Image (cartoon, rainbow, N blue to C red):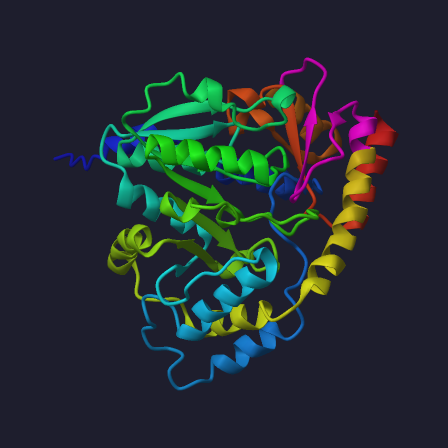
Amino acid sequence: MTISIYPSFNLKKISEYYFYKKNKELKFLEKKGNKIINLGIGNPDLFPPLGVIKTMKKASENENANKYQEYLGIPNLRKKFSEWYYKNYKIDLNPENEIFPLMGSKEGILYTSMAYLNKNDYVLIPNPGYPTYTSISKLIGGKIIYYSLIEKNKWLPNLFEINKFNLNKVKIFWINYPHMPTGAKINIEELEKIVFFSIKNNILLVHDNPYSFILNDNPISIFNIKKSKDVSLELNTLSKSYNMAGWRIGMIAGKKNILENIIKIQSQVHSGMYFPLQKGAIEAMKFNNNWFISQNKEYYKRRNIIWEICDLLKISYSKNSAGLFVWGKLNKKNDILWTNKILYKYKIFITPGSIFGSNGKGYVRLSLCCKKQFLKTAKKRIIKNY
């Protein structure tokens, strides 16, 4: 007798995450003796601030460390997030009811979608943009309206074009600046237009904000805009800012009545963040702006080498970008085929822009999360074999 256990129909709406599949290929190549230089993933390789790991180790010996933790995080963590927001964005957030710690901001994308999307509700998602916005919306049964971001418009939303859609059933509007994958920045005036658009159309605006402090002289929060709390949430994380990606420490902020619906979801999914991680996060956020200055010095050096690599490969790019990536334009080439060619010819993995949406076709993304010596090796391989 053959037993067939069928998966959910929802799984047909998505595929495996691109980088999950690609890593299998990279590991296969490395097993065959190839030394792959990975410029694909934004996985910080630098260390967290001095003292953070020591703090976490000490916290692990606390008698309460291994117990269930508070659903909302320990009060000192919420307090420190509030102080951090004021220090870096000049924003007042009430630590009691306007800040909610997350196990990585990716978790917040899921919880927000679960809390606010009904089946067949519409979601505004950037093209190009972070693929997780799409996959989670599909899993929940939401319908997607991709709004176009193009180089000519500096990768900013064209609200005039978005307004042509039927917005009556749109529930969530995802934005992300500094933008991933393009590195585009946004100013207060442009952000203000988006907030007022969301207010006018009664749409929940969610700003995904993990790259504020990476090669960016002007960190901006959605809450720098007046009245934004009435319609907005903001996701943030320590993953990129403090090199703690594997720790999975993030947060979501917003008005109490909006945020409490997300807390309902979270309380059913897990039972609090590991105590030492919370203590480590508190320690990290004690560091002042000199931490970001020092870290960015390293990223500036890496980016300069990546720009040289782009020049060798005839990739055009903007020098007015922020974040952990360089976004480059190919000269009328298929980005999927081109990146595969680069991988097998030079043993260098570069991310094709197509995985971020149709507007990413013909573009590529190169990560700064690679030590200078490996970047120099990549450059030498290209020069030698071009």
Between 8 and 327, the one lying in front of the other is 327
Quick one: quadrant of the N terminus? top left
Task: Give coordinates of residue 257: x percent, y percent.
Answer: 29, 53
213 in the magenta segment: no
Residue 17: in sight, yes or no? no
Q: Residue furthest bottom?
A: 63
What segment is highlighted magenta in the picture?
309-335
Task: Give coordinates of residue 140: x percent, y percent.
Answer: 28, 36
Q: Quadrant of residue 353?
A: top right
Q: Residue at x 63, y 53 (%)?
A: 44
- Please give left or right for residue 304 compared with residue 178 in the image: right
In the image, residue 113 above or below residue 201: below
Between 220 and 55, the one lying in front of the other is 220
Between 180 and 248, the one lying in front of the other is 180
Quick one: quadrant of the C terminus? top right
Task: Give coordinates of residue 106: x percent, y percent.
Answer: 44, 48
Q: Residue at x 61, y 56 (%)?
A: 241
Task: Give coordinates of residue 29: x percent, y percent.
Answer: 63, 37
In the image, residue 314 above or below residue 194: above
- Please give left or right for residue 19 compared with residue 385 in the image: left
Q: Residue at x 48, y 49 (%)?
A: 223
In the image, residue 375 above or below residue 181: below
In the image, residue 296 above or below residue 357: below
Q: Quadrant of residue 13?
A: top left
Residue 129: in sight, yes or no? yes
Q: Residue furthest top?
A: 332
